[in-house]
Image (tube, rainbow, N blue to C red):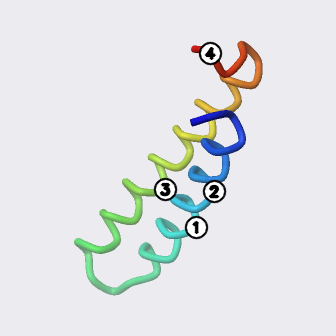
Amino acid sequence: MGELGDKIKGNINEAIGKAKQMSNDPETKADGAAQEAKGKGEQVKGKVKGLLGDDI
């Protein structure tokens, strides 16, 4: 997946994670926090690909 794809996927995961954290269920909140962190990681991956090229 290229730079743009990783950034989009990251944004989606962050948004879903933030929505899950609004729940009253502690398990859903924890899942949301993990999903948000995953999204941030995907965005960093996309930025690195942008700097180094999609071939990494």
| Residue at the farthest left position | 27
Whole-Å distance between the Cαs marked 2 and 1?
Answer: 6 Å
Mark 2 and mark 1 residues within 8 Å of each other at the beta carbon? yes
Please identify, in this view, whether the residue under mark 4 or under mark 2 is nearer the observer: 4
Dot 2: element: helix
What percent of the width, then of the height, locates residue 8?
66, 52
Query: The disc labelled 3 sits on which kind of residue?
Result: Glu
Whole-Å distance between the Cαs marked 4 and 3?
Answer: 26 Å
Q: Is residue 26 above or below residue 12?
A: below
Whole-Å distance between the Cαs marked 3 and 1?
Answer: 7 Å
Whole-Å distance between the Cαs marked 4 and 2?
Answer: 22 Å
Query: The disc labelled 1 sits on which kind of residue?
Result: Ala
Mark 4 and mark 3 residues within 8 Å of each other at the beta carbon? no
Q: Is residue 27 above or below residue 45?
A: below
Q: Is residue 39 above or below residue 23?
A: above
Tag 2 residue = 11
